[in-house]
Amino acid sequence: MTYCVGLCLNDGIVFMSDTRTNSGVDNISTFRKMHTWEVPGERAITILSAGNLATTQAVVSLLDERSKAHAERRPDILNAPTMFQIVTLVGQTLREVIASNASGGMVADSGIFNATLLVGGQVGEGEQRLFMIYPEGNFIEASTDTPFFQIGETKYGRPIILRAYDPAMGFEEAVKLLLVSFDSTIKANLSVSPPLDVHVYEKGSLKLGRVFRIEGDDPYFQEISTGWGVALRDAFRQLPRFDFPDEQG
């Protein structure tokens, strides 16, 4: 399992992903689930992945290969003219990889090859955009009504974002919010774990922004984790006392 979030703000998009993969309690590994591409001054693209690791790695490898190959392979994600066309290409590639794996004699279990992707960024004079791509290759786009997407183990961290999200918040506050969301998920599910990869894309920059990794023993992350637990206990104690209703004779 995994946990990835793309969060749209007025000033840009914040991406965060964990790095744990596992096929059992005794087979745990760390793999990057965030992948980025850029043509400075022209485009910046980020993809977050959840699902079958072989599928997602094959998709990323194909996107890389096709962006560096002959001109006859165009369009690719580094020259497609819009984010919509980029996401369409990524969706087609995902569907192609899943179909290729499933045709190898495991059609009945084709679901094990499934993966879901978040794709966000900006191309040229177009708006910054964020999409979620399903295993079938179709996709939906974030909007003012749905300003963030999660993939993987979403249920534990979602209430945190819903209660505190503000599109006008700064990047620092957004990273802090996502760290709280990830901390809640990590504490509830052993299949999600640091290190956490972060990319902060600044709207209109058309280049990769701050890209960094937060380790599990990072002092700020530890402070957030401890402080959030204390704040929850304090808030709980301040809520009105519950009294049992009087027994009726």
Image: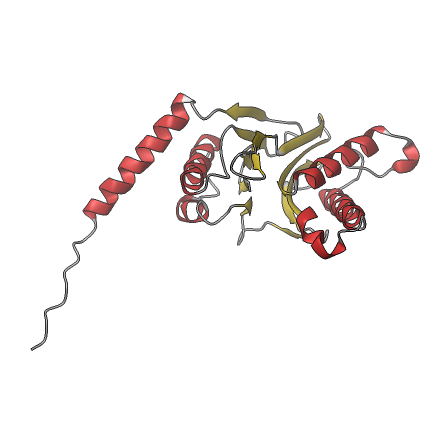
Looking at the picture, how far across and down is residue 64, in whole percent?
77, 31
Q: Is residue 169 left or right of residue 32?
A: left
Looking at the picture, how far across and down is residue 48, in whole percent?
62, 38
Q: Is residue 183 left or right of residue 207?
A: left
Colour theme: secondary structure
**Residue 138 appears in the figure:** no
Judge whether 44 appears above or below 158 on screen.
above
Farthest residue, direction front: 26
Query: Which residue is painted at 75% across and 51% down in the image?
Result: 106
Name which quarter of the figure residue 97 lies in. Answer: top right
Q: How many marks?
A: 0
Judge whether 192 appears above or below 104 on screen.
above
Observer-nearest of 135 and 202: 135
Query: Which residue is painted at 24% across and 46% down in the image?
Result: 236
**Residue 223 appears in the figure:** yes
Looking at the picture, how far across and down is residue 147, in whole percent?
54, 48
Q: Quadrant of the C terminus?
A: bottom left
Q: Quadrant of the N terminus?
A: top right
Query: Which residue is painted at 50% across and 39% down in the image?
Result: 191
Query: Which residue is painted at 42% across and 23% down in the image?
Result: 217
Looking at the picture, how far across and down is residue 188, in whole percent?
41, 43
Farthest residue, direction bottom: 249
Q: Is residue 15 left or right of residue 35?
A: left
Farthest residue, direction left: 249
